[in-house]
Amino acid sequence: MKSFGRGPEQIGFKVHIRYLVFFMIDQTLPINQIIHGDAVKEMNALPENSIDLIFADPPYNMQIKGDLWRPDFSKVDGVDDEWDKFEDYRSYDAFTLAWLQAAHRLLKDNGAIWVIGTYHNIYRVGKLLQDLGFWIINEIIWEKINPMPNFRGVRFTNAHETLIWAKKTESGKYTINYHAMKPFNNGKQMRSVWTLPICKGKERIRLNGERVHSTQKPLALLYRVILSSTNPGDVILDPFFGTGTTGAAAKILHRNWIGIEQDKFYIPVAQERIDLIKPEKFAPQTFDIKDKKRLAPRVPFARLLEYGLLKPGQELCFNLNPEQTATVKPNGNLLYNGFEGSIHQTTKHILDGKPANGWLHWFYADENGNFQSIDTLREIVRKDYF
C-alpha cells in the first residue's frame, strides 16, 4: 500500500465547532502534496468518496501541425508538448474516459468537478461526463481579454475557453456560494461569462526567459472556481497539476489540495510557487462566505402566532401601503379582499402571479404604531428558539 507523509496541515485547524469539517478529512489522503505519476493510476490509488472538488485541466489534443509565425516573423510558442499528443480521437476518448471514471469514484456524493477545454476537446469531454452519470450544472465561458491573435488570418481569433461544472449525480447536492460571487460582478448575479486576462507578465512562470508551461492558467480563474464551489477545509484534487495554480488558489483560500503531475519537470516549479504563498491566518468570521439567510432554519409563518409575536386577527400592511392590508388567520394564512393563502401565495396574488418572498413584503405595526417587517420576527424565532 502506498503511504504518504502527513504534515501539520493534515491534522486540522482548532476552530469554532461550525468548522469541524476540517477534522473530517480522510487521514490517508496526501493532503497538500504533489504526487508524481500517471493521473489515472494515482487517482485509483486514492480512497473512494474522499474528494470534495476536482479541477481538471487535461490535455486538449490540439494537434497543431506546422509552425505559427507572427507578422514580424517571430515564431509563436504554441502547444506542441508531448503530453498533448494522441494518435487519434479514439485514443484521446479512451484516455478521457479512464480519468473521468477515476474522478467519479473519488468524488463524495455531494462532490463536483470542473473541466476546462477548448473546441478541440470540450465536446468530447462533455459527452463522456454525461455518459458516466455526471450532471452538468453550468457551462462557463472564460472570455480572454488579451487572446493570442490568429496570425494566419484563416479563422476568427480563439478568444475563449469553456469550463464544464458538473456534480457527481443528478440528485446530489453540491456547494455553490452564490451570493459570495456577486461582488465579482458589481453586486449583480454572477453570469456564465467570465472576462479575465490570460496568464502573462509577472504571473507567467519563466525559466531563462522561456515560459515553463504552455497552458498555465491565471490565478484569477481558479480563485473564482474554488471560491464559488468549495468551503474552507474542503479537499480539491487537480490530476493535471502543471505549475500548481489550483494549489496556489486553494492555499490562499484555506482549502486543502492534492496535485498529480506526470512530468517531473513541473513538480519543483509548482512546489516552490506554493511554498512562497503565505496565506492570512484562518479566522471563521473572515472566511465564512456562506449565504446565512438561505441556509438558516426554515420558520413557518404560523410559528409567529404560536410564540405570540403576532395575533390572530391582526392586520398586516403590504409594502407599507396602508390601503393594502390583510388579516392574519389563526392558521397563519392571510385574508386579503376575499383571497386566502399563505404569505407567499397572497403576495403572488397581489403581484398578478409574480412569485415573491412574502417575508419581505408584509409589515406589522409595533407597540408604538411604527411599521416593522415581519422578517424581523422570523429572525427573533431563529435566534431564540433554534
Image (cartoon, helix red, strand yellow):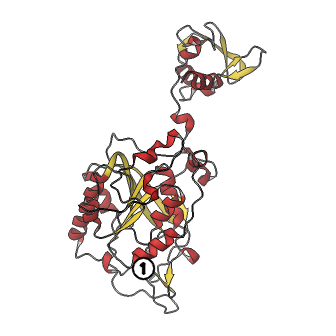
Q: Nearer the viewer, residue 379 or 356?
A: 379
State whether residue 80 is above or below residue 355. below
Q: Is residue 257 left or right of residue 82?
A: right
Tell me which residue sits at (63%, 13%) in the image: 310
The residue shown at (54%, 75%) is 200
Question: Label 1: few (<14), some or many (≥20) within 10 Å?
Answer: few
* Above or below, 6 relative to 108: below
Residue at left offset 31%, top offset 80%: 82
Instruction: Specify whether 101 is left or right of 367.
Output: left
Give the percent coordinates (x, y) of residue 145: 56, 69
Mark 1: secondary structure: loop
Residue 384 in view here: yes
Q: Residue furthest right?
A: 368
- Residue 18, how many percent across, how many down? 51, 39
Closest to the observer, 12 or 21 = 12
**Is the N terminus in the top left, top right, bottom left or bottom right quadrant?**
bottom left
Q: Residue 124's quadrant in the figure?
A: bottom left
Amino acid type, mark 1: Val
- Nearer-the-camera pick, 117 or 220: 220
> Which residue in the structure is indicated by mark 1?
154
On screen, residue 179 above or below 85: above
Query: Toward which corner of the image does residue 329 lie, by quadrant?
Result: top right
Q: Residue furthest bottom?
A: 73
Rendered location of residue 333, percent (x, y):
54, 13
Picture coordinates of residue 189, whole percent (x, y): 56, 47
